[in-house]
Amino acid sequence: MSTNMRGLNTFITDIRHCSNKEQEEKRVEKELQKIRGKFTSQKGLAGYQKKKYVWKLLYIYILGYEVDFGQQECAFLINSSKFSEKYTGYVATSILVSEKTHDLFTQVASSIRNDLQSVNEINQSLALTMVGTQAPQELVNALHQDVQKLALTESRSTFHVRKKACACLLRMYRKYQDKFQPSQWAQGISQMFESRHPSLGFMTAATSLLVGTCQLDNPSIFEDCTPKLIKLLHKIAIQKDSPGDYNYYATPAPWLQVKILKALSFFSPPPPSTDSHRQLTECLTKIIKKTEVTKSINKNNVDHGILFEAANLVITYNGAVGMELKNDILKLLGIFISVKEPNLRYLGLETMCKFVKLAGDSLEDHLNTIFKSLRDNDISIRKRALDLLYLISSPNTSQRIVEELLSYAENGADLQIKDDLVLKIAILSEKFADNLYWYIDVVVRMINSSGDFVTEDIWFRIIQIIVGFQKEGNPELQKYAATKLYSQLSMPHVHETLICIGAFIISEYSQMLVEQNKEPQKLFDILNKHYTFSTERSRQMLLNAFIKLASKYPELKDQAIMICQIAGEHFDPDIQQRGIEYFSLLMEDDKLLNQIVVKMPPYSEQVQLNNPLTKRIYGMVLNPKEQKDPTLLNQARIQANQEIAMAEQRLQSKPEQLQKHLSWLKACPYLNQFQGQIALEGVNIMVPPSPDDNNLKSPSISNINEIKLLLTSQIGKIVDKPDDLVVQYKSEINGHLGKISFQFEAKSPIQNLSILVSQTNGMLFNILPVKQGDFPQVMMQVLSYDGNMTLPIASVFYEENGQQKKREFHLPIYTNKFVQPVDMPYDKFTKFFDDFTNNLVNPNYFKLDTFIRNTAPSNIPMSEVLKKAGGLLSVGLNLKAQPFPSLENLQMIWACGQLIIKPPEQNNILNLPIMVVISSLDQTTEFLRVGIRCGGNGEIAKNYLKLIMLYLG
Amino acid sequence: MINFILMVNKQGQTRLAQYFQFLSVKERMTLEGELIRKCLSRSETQCSFLEHRGYKIIYRRYASLYFIIGMDLEEENEMAYLEFIHNLVETLDKYFENVCELDIMFNIEKAHYILEEMVMNGQIVETNKTQILAPIHVLDKAKDE
């Protein structure tokens, strides 16, 4: 290969001699400048020069510097007829040119095709390698058929080219699955394994293609490869009939053996008493029973690689082949996890995780060894040991395992593993708590040793379990928990999380402690002792505890009042609000207090089943490219998929309603006009709210008329009863944030006004202190975090003429207030709209289609009705609404916008699309068609339909 | 599949990098820096496998040079890939006769070519040293003539 480039060598030597990063940067900068000059100068560069500079750029890029020019020079080198230049072009393009540089790829596509179709196998290989490295869309579009042909059909191309074509094809398929139909490959792939004198390199690539395709598509279409794969494996592993130069330290073609075993795991086991069954049993037996440890570490490594893969296959087949090898595998794994060689220890533990289901209790013999691995000096091994302990926990072993995990958490566990450790202790202790006292002891110890890692979901769950699900909780447990926490909190320094739980439990079950001769005052003191030194979070919980205690024991009232009064001036808005509200509650007569501070009801069964902790374990596994947990992967994925499917079913809770809606739609005589534009199949089809479900029209809203006006504007009166109370209202909403202010006016001066907001689904309200006066004023901040919004209710308490009064009214804050119009050309809009309609699986696409009654009097022409709808959508509902095909000949209004929300615990703001069409029908003026598409949450579509019905219905 | 193969020296200088997905320069530098620090912090008595940023990392050290492979987590058989690194080193050795870091630095285009013969698009395509080196020998000869 002609590569002797003096300039390049000099440059590399220079870089090597740089003694520090600054010098290196300077040298690189200088070189980049020089190359840029050469590339931009008018003088043409010789191919050799270009090649040299491109290699320099590559070198600079690998060193970690941005290279933002020269991409064109790289790509055009592909056209060169000299091999070394062509090679440089291909390598550089695959590395330096981002797949987003669309034009460039379009420009070189035809010379790449020439190379693919040439008879020069080296050029063919170069082209295949480059195309497959990034698989840019332009090249996949242009070349996928050529590649497919090279890989699958036995033409004149060599095995050398075909193996590369296989790798390239798999890469393309992984990236653009919808472009390919693997079912058409079945025959071609199957034939690959038939050739009599195969190149084992080609077999490796072909098996990789098979494995890769099975991972993404239904493996059963390739089922007839099984006997051929087994025959090939038998030939290599048993008959040793393979070319000697594929031996690696005397093991024949180890990587191919591993791949074949892997591929077999996708298919059903060969039926008993067939040749294949016999051959495979022979292979597996030999691999598992006859693998010997030799002096060569390299041979041992590949042999063990094959051995682990064989063990995996036996596990996957669930014993259908080689069941008698189960004990041998178990014995081997037992040896592996106790040897000195760390790699074997690691893999032994990892494989045991997979083996749990098949092995049953027999793994328990190894508990002590696994406990030892939990304290290995290698974090990789510790993690595997923790996974394994979690998986093998059973009613028999759980107490021992949890005890070991706890003592590890108390003593030795490091930060890298504690998160996971705490989560697993929490799940196991709940799952295997046949003795609930034990559960309490475990969680208290867990918080004491690793409180900083006990996240909210974990301690919420602990409280839920103590309170109980569905029916009244277990009083013995509650008593035990209260006593235990009482004694824990008596200590001077306690972890914050324990204070939170303690505050809740001690105040909730104070009665049980008092029955044990504990003075209420003592309970109060024990909690109060921690108040000064606590964080905001635990102070909030403590304030709750104080008001609960004060409502039960009047003698504590004065002290609680004092604390709340001080808290009312706290800088933290949550504590301040609690302080002010609890203060006023405590000042009320006891009747009201006792009505509000009531015993916590048990949680619903739903809460019990939806354990967020187990979800988190699965979540960890499912989130791509985040912390994933490979050994749990397959099991967890199956379970999680089942749970998700169940949850989805629950979400779409009323399948019969959906069915009813769909059959109604399908029966509509107007459907023909909208063929393909109405979603009738797939997930996330929403059912329009029934008239009694439409709470926007409900007569129970006293200020419905005002609301109707205000939902489309920003200023006005929400309640307008001149004899009673007038509420002036002004709002300013921008993006996901808003400010609302009120002024109250009654016939006589108003005193001591306070306001509460409830039914605030999807929104967060922060109420600032009331500005009292003859006309009190209140300011609120509001934030949207979810599309599932309801119309909030404000309750106002005030005194007029010395009389206590309460008024309730709805606030005109709804989904549309957080929507902004989006400008979009019509063709783009229809494309998106249709994508949503026709996508059957995307869980983020929500669709709602219906026909609504046109309530306008019959003498009003349809175009006027649509104009009104357009006005509503654009002025009132904050979408960008436009006529179709034109304003003169109006048939449809289409509108587009985005809902802006900021989900809690996320830093980014989400813009969820929302698209609405309202169109007239050809056959009748009695109905209008409404179609809504939205992202994020189906409630958005429902809410919009409610709004449309409110104004047009 | 294999997501990347790196050769990085103890000082954290990357000598050869092949990614099978596009990462920006910044992402690459961060990843490579983190990986080499993690590898350096591990001792001989610890295993050759790590999890990092959602990759399964398999590494092996030869003198001052670390060979690092990043795989999908779902991909199994760490042992086979661990030994594949050795096969790669032996192949480079066979071509360069006692390969060292400098050989790779100054012959980056050849090292690259050899790697591409063995791994393509994240898949192992060839493990037979004679087969791997055949094309590059042909090309070398063509130049001599």
Image (cartoon, rainbow, N blue to C red):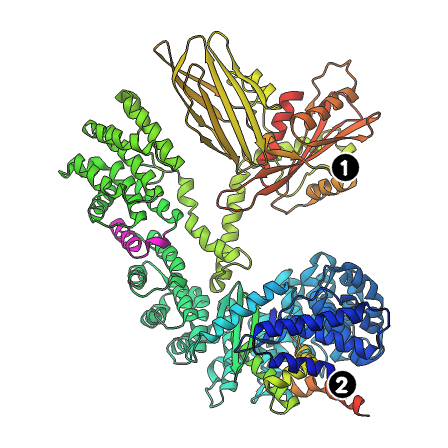
Chain where mark 2 sits:
A
Between A588 and A309, which is closer to the camera in this rendering? A588
Q: In which quarter of the image is residue A331?
A: bottom left
Q: Is residue A4 above or below residue A379?
A: below
- Does A439 lie within the magenta span? yes
- Does A708 lie within the magenta span? no
Q: Main secondary structure of the magenta part?
A: helix
Q: In which quarter of the image is residue A682?
A: top right
Between A648 and A310, which is closer to the camera in this rendering? A648
Between A598 and B30, which is closer to the camera in this rendering? B30
Q: In this view, does A496 lie above or below A708?
A: below
Residue A1 numbered mark, or none: 2
Drawn side of residue A649 relative to residue A385, left or right: right
Three-letter code, disc 1: Gln
Q: What stretch is highlighted in magenta?
A: A434-454
Q: Mark 1 points at which residue?
A: A675
Q: Is residue A733 above or below residue A706?
A: below
Chain where mark 1 sits:
A
Q: Position of residue B145 (x, y in %)?
A: 82, 92
Residue at x 45% of width, y 8% of height: A747
Q: Position of residue B61 (x, y in %)?
A: 52, 81
Helix, strand or loop status at disc 1 = loop
Drawn side of residue A266 relative to residue A834, left or right: left
Residue at x 48% of width, y 80% of height: A288
Q: Where is residue A125 in the image (x, y as percent from the top left)?
A: 76, 76
Between A175 and A742, which is closer to the camera in this rendering? A742
Helix, strand or loop status at disc 2 = loop
Three-letter code, disc 2: Met
Does any portion of residue B127 appear in the rendered image? no
Q: In the rendered structure, which disc, 1 or 2, sits on the residue that comes first in sequence?
A: 2
Q: Position of residue A730 (x, y in %)?
A: 55, 23
The residue sitting at the left extreme is A517
